[in-house]
Amino acid sequence: MSNEAPARILVVDDSEANRRMLVDFLTAQGHVCEAANGGAEALERLRSEPPDLVLLDVDMPQIDGLEVLETIRGAEDIPGVPVIMISGVEDRRVVARCIELGADDFLPKPFDPVLLKARVSASLWRKRTRDRERRLTEDLEEKVRALRQAEALRDAMSNMLVHDLATPLSVIRMNVELLALKQSMGLFDPDASRTGLDKISAASESLSRLVQGILDVARLESGQLNVRLSLVECAPLLADVAEMFAGPADERGSRIVVDEQVKGVRVFADEDLLRRMLQNLVANAIKYGGSGATVTLRAERNGDATVLSVSDDGPGIPDHALPHVFDAFYRAPSAGSTRWFGVGLGLAFCRLAAEAQGASISVRSVPGSETTFAVEFR
Ligand code: ATP
Ligand code: MG
C-alpha cells in the first residue's frame, strides 16, 4: 500500500459469508471497506459517497451485478469508479459481458488471495494514475486560462499604448499641415500660428513625457537605473514640488499644503528619484482630486521609519481598484481624467523607484474623504 492514503473499497455481495471474508481480507491489507448486500444498496452508496473501487458479485437476486454495472457506467451522477466483477460461474459469456459493460477486471470464486490482492492493487493503481492525470490536466488547463488572460490584458495594454502615442502625434501632424498649408497660400495669421504652435508644443511635451515614462519603467524593471543614495533634506524638496504644481493646482481651484512637521526631517534616498515620485503623486492628486481639492505633503518620523506622503480629499479610489493602481498601464475605471497624458505609468514608476531605494509605497483611500500615498523608508 506504500504511503498512499488508504483506499475505500465497496464490497457488494448478497452472501454474508462472502462479504465478511472479502472485507476482512481487504481490511487486513490496509484498505477501508464498506459492504452492501445487494444491487440497490450498492447504487445508493455509489451515489452518496463514491469509493475508489467496487468488488461486485455477478449473481445476486433482484438487481444483479451486470445490471448494477450497466447502471454505474450509464449514470452521469456516478463518477468513473473502477469495478472488479466476481462470479462463481466462470462462464466465458458472462466474463465477456462484464468486459463489454466496462468492468475493469474479473475474479472467479472461490477467492485466490494472491490473485485478489494483485487485481485490487492493479485497479487501484490505475485509478490513482488516472486521478493524477486528471488533476494535472485540470492544473494545466487552469494555467493556460491564466496565460490567455494575461496575454489578452497585454494586448489590450499595447493597443492602449499605441493609441496614447498616436493621439498627440496626430495633433502635431494636423497642426503642422495646417500651418504649412496656410503658409503656402500666403495666409499668415500670427494668432492662429501661435495657437497651432502651442498645440504642437503641448502634444510633443506629452509625447516625450510618455516615452520618458516608458523608458523609466523599463530601466527600473531591468535594474539599469543608477541609484545614488544620500541624506536628503525633506523640507526644501517638498516645498519645491509644491511650488512646481502651484500653477496647475490654481487652475483647478485646488491648493497644495506642506505640513509643518516636515522641518528637520531627513531621509536616505536618491533625491532625483524621490522628487519624480513626489511629482507623480502630486500630479495625480491634482488630476484625480477634482476641483477645489486640498493636497497635503508630509514627511515625518514614524518609529525607525521615515514616511513621506501625499494626501488629497478628492473622490478617492474604489476598493476593487486599490490592489491594481501600482500596475503598469492601469487606470481606475472611474478616473475623471480622459486626457491623453495619463497612461497609467506614474504609480508603476513610483513603486519601482521606491523599491530601487529600498523603500516601499502604499495607498489608503476612503473615497470622498482622504486618499494617501505613503512612501516609507526604513
Ligand atoms: P500617468 O501617471 O502615466 O500619466 P495615470 O495618472 O493614469 O497616468 P498612475 O499615476 O499610475 O497613472 O495612476 C493610476 C490610476 O490610479 C489613475 O489612472 C487613477 O485612476 C488612479 N489614481 C491615482 N492617484 C489617484 C488619486 N489621488 N485619487 C484618485 N485616483 C487616483
Ligand atoms: Mg499619474
Image (tube, helix red, strand yellow):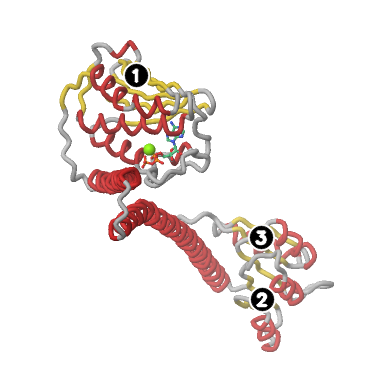
Q: Are marks 2 and 3 in contact (CB under 8 Å)?
A: no
x then y, percent, for residue 289: 46, 29
Query: Is residue 138 shown left or right of residue 92?
Result: left
x then y, percent, for residue 178: 34, 56
- Residue placed furthest toward the bottom: 93
Q: CA distance from mark 2 to mark 3?
A: 25 Å
Mark 3 vs 1, N-terminal side: 3
Q: Nearer the viewer, mark 3 or mark 1?
A: 1
**What residue is rendered at 71% in x and 62% in y?**
46
Q: CA distance from mark 3 to mark 1?
A: 63 Å
Label 3 Cα neighbours within 10 Å, binned few <14 / some 14-19 / many ≥20: many
Q: Nearer the viewer, residue 122 or 222?
A: 222
x then y, percent, for residue 160: 41, 54
Image disc number at residue 109:
2
Image disc number at residue 298:
1
Dot 2 lies on which element? loop
Q: What type is the residue that disc 1 sits on?
A: Arg
| Residue 99 placement: quadrant | bottom right
Residue 2 in sight here: no
Image disc number at residue 50:
3
Image disc number at residue 155:
none
Q: What type is the residue that disc 3 sits on?
A: Pro
| Residue 230 placement: quadrant | top left
